[in-house]
DNA sequence: CCACTTACTTTCGTCGCGAAAATATTCACC
DNA sequence: GGTGAATATTTTCGCGACGAAAGTAAGTGG
């Protein structure tokens, strides 16, 4: 099993395209693939043969699913063998490392978390290697590791700057590769989540798509033309301190009236605590607001309006087909959905198309899954980090 | 001269890439090109030979320009023969057609305008053909025609919907091709201006770039990853009625407090007229504001703050390397630049990088030039409209 | 004049593709 | 069952684009 690990790694460009198309858009016949990829029928025979031989694709008998029994020879759908390879995804937080094992389709097959007791790069790498070894024992066909970290990540390998780990230029991918012998991809955690949603989640098949995460901080990712826009994380965090209401609340985590100061979980907790003097959890505040507690309702209502304003502005300038709200703080939508909608409407033309808004409650394992998706993209399918290579045959 | 018209039209993909690279990024040696395009040295000999033979490229002796006299055989820079082919660009407005003749590098070599007396498609096409014939007499090496129209344009050929011409599904490209025998490209006027700036203007070589035009209306265009984002004009104009200040002025051209109602030339003129009862031009209002007239200063100041807010929001969500303000209404920046700056600052994090803002006063000939650039891109270099073709080897 | 360096050209083999013909598999209809 | 049409896939063949490597050109510095 493990012996084949690298056998189908070196895919040609055409094979990659086929593999990705099947992976992302479900079972497809050779003829479908030829049409989608703009290739001839003959090329598809050529490209699919080695993929099937290597075990990455199979001819499914699932023809029964589509009963549209047309004339002629029936098509032979090809599908990815999702279990043929598994991947590890890690999300590193301040005090925990969350790990998942996924299939090629990024379905989670196992979870494994460990507390993070040291921020020293070597110790973190040790812990990741231990976790990987533990999981590798139970899942032998491991093909690669993805790691998501908050902060600036360069070349999908080096943590250029991470405020909460207090890291600068830590070659994390190398450290973990040394210890595990597995190929490792490191990426900004938001970027990883965006890729995961663009390939396998809410943004599948969309051309213009935005992800906004609410949690300890705010995350923002753009997909345009089907590809994630890089560079959104380059600014050292100032970019996301969008000023929503210059007269808004002042909290420790963000400029006065900024989205960070009005929407993030710490900011909301701070506001309620400052007013009541009690320590309360985010969930308690949401429940309080729903139950009519005036203090909680005021803070949550203000957060809802801020979120609506943010969504409207994003819709105005990016015009996405969908906006996904994710993260640990999206419970806000359930309680203050009305305030959000009102604010969206107030900030858009009355006849403008409604903003397709989707909410996805996500925990840390979803972030880890995002990192695994990065590993799938890069290691198996060779969808390389294009931020370094020059522009191709497509204009300036 | 004219006999060669189509002789270098069918460029291979590799030749196109070379031609575009040289056209946009100035004289380059074969070795430079090999590095930039990721090709081997041998390929560059092969690709450049037919381009030089056809007269599209020349070996310049301008080596003297770079006196960095390194060791070894000196490189032989190649440059585009900008005059080898000329292009026509038209901008159609309500009552005028503005025309320009440009070189391959989109330098304007002649201008020619005619009043538009009828909005009937056949008559408009007749007029464009007359103007083209007139210009073709003086510029025999005409290779193509670009036409910029406000409104929705499909397949770079059909005006799907144009409010000011009252057109629906007018196959303008076909009509003009019939009459002139020249290949014709039709595109939304803002899209054309954005392409022109991205290739030859303020956005040359930039990865993320925004164009905002202020005139009779507002225009907005995005360039991300070096390519213009398509689809921004699909919404029938509602999208750009960004609500800036819900309590703002109400004018005939736009929702209350929307950018259109606060920033466009008709809206500003309306506000001053409504208050003073006098008919005044935009320039008079700007002069009045600069001279201290309280009414003009109030309207212009409010417009400046609206513009600053807009710029800040764009900067926040798109994080471009540059924002270009263009159009007939950018005189606002000279008079109200301070108000704009203040509003930008109020809506961004205090430590966020300043927004690189560039202002370009542009008249209708600049719009016509944009259309000519579209013709250059599509007709000569074969940079086809990629909005219809399926996604390439690059993910979903 | 002779190394040495860099730029460019030539030659040759390989690879990926499409076109077209061949083959396979089904349905519709007799 | 047999025949023909429809659709999917495979096979075959030739072409064009590319890179590797060797060869040539044109300078510098001694």
Image (tube, coloured by chain):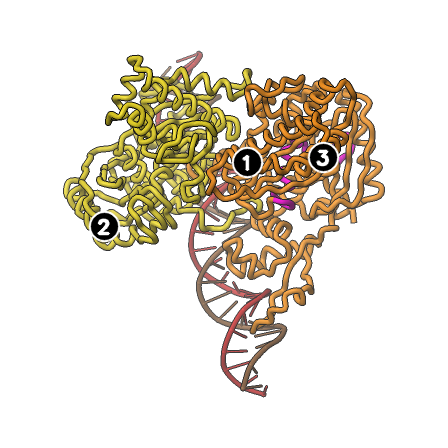
Chain colours: A yellow, B orange, C red, D brown
Tag shown at residue B344: 1
**Closer to the camera in the image, A371 or A92:** A92
Tag shown at residue A125: 2
N-terminal-most mark, 1 or 3: 3
Q: Do pointers 2 and 1 mark residues of a single chain?
A: no
Residue under mark 3: which chain is it in? B
Counting from the top left corner in percent of width and height, residue A237 is at 40, 41
Which image quadrant for residue A132? top left
Which image quadrant for residue A69? top left
Counting from the top left corner in percent of width and height, residue A260 is at 39, 32
Question: Which residue is pictured at 63% across the width and 25% down the height?
Answer: B262
Residue located beneath label 3 in the image: B290
Asked if marks 2 and 1 touch (Cβ < 8 Å), the reply is: no
- Can residue A190 be found in the magenta stretch? no
SS category of the residue bearing label 2: helix
SS category of the residue bearing label 3: helix
- The part of the chain drawn in magenta is B176-202
Counting from the top left corner in percent of width and height, residue A74 is at 37, 25
- Camera-nearest label, 3 or 2: 3
Marks 3 and 2, Cα distance to the nearest angstrom?
63 Å
Question: Which residue is pictured at 27% across the width and 45% down the height?
Answer: A144
Counting from the top left corner in percent of width and height, residue B203 is at 60, 44
Asked if marks 3 and 2 touch (Cβ < 8 Å), the reply is: no
- Camera-nearest label, 1 or 3: 3
Horizontal placement of A189 versus B281: left or right?
Answer: left
Q: Residues within 10 Å of mark 1 (few under 14, many from 20)?
A: many
Marks 1 and 3, Cα distance to the nearest angstrom?
21 Å
Horizontal placement of B111 versus B375: left or right?
Answer: right
Q: Do pointers 1 and 3 mark residues of a single chain?
A: yes
């Amino acid at each position: 099993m493990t012996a084949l690990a690298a056998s189908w790694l070196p895919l040609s460009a055409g094979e990659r395209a086929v593999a990705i198309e099947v992976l992302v858009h479900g079972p497809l016949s050779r003829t479908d693939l030829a049409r989608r990829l703009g290739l001839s029928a003959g090329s598809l025979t050529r490209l699919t043969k080695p993929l099937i031989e290597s075990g990455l694709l199979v001819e499914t008998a699932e023809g029964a699913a589509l009963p549209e029994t047309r004339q002629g020879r029936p098509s032979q759908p090809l599908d990815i063998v999702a279990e043929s390879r598994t991947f590890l995804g890690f999300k590193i937080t301040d005090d925990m490392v969350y790990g998942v094992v996924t299939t090629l389709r990024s379905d989670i097959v196992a979870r494994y978390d460990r507390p993070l007791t040291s921020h020293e790069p070597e110790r973190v790498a040790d812990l990741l290697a231990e976790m990987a070894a533990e999981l590798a024992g139970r899942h032998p066909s491991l093909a690669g590791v993805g790691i998501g970290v908050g902060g600036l990540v360069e070349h999908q390998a080096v943590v250029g700057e991470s405020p909460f780990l207090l890291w600068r230029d830590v070659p994390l991918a190398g450290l973990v590769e040394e210890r595990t012998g597995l190929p490792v991809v490191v990426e900004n955690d938001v970027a990883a989540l965006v890729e995961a949603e663009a390939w396998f989640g809410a943004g599948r098949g969309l051309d213009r798509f935005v992800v906004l995460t609410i949690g300890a901080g705010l995350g923002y990712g753009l997909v345009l033309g089907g590809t994630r826009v890089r560079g959104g994380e380059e600014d050292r965090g100032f970019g996301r301190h969008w000023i929503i209401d210059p007269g808004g609340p002042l909290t420790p985590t963000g400029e006065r009236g900024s989205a960070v100061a009005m929407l993030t979980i710490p900011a909301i907790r701070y506001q309620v605590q400052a007013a009541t003097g009690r320590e309360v959890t985010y969930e308690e505040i949401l429940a309080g607001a729903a139950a009519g507690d005036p203090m909680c309702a005021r803070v949550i209502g203000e957060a809802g309006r801020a979120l609506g304003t943010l969504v409207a502005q994003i819709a105005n300038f990016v015009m996405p087909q969908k906006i996904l709200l994710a993260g640990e703080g999206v419970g806000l939508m359930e309680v203050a959905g009305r305030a959000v909608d009102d604010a969206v409407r107030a900030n858009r033309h009355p006849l403008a198309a409604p903003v397709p808004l989707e909410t996805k409650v996500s925990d840390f394992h979803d972030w880890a899954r995002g990192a695994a998706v990065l590993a799938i993209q890069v290691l198996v399918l060779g969808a390389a980090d294009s931020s370094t290579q020059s522009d191709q045959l497509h204009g300036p």
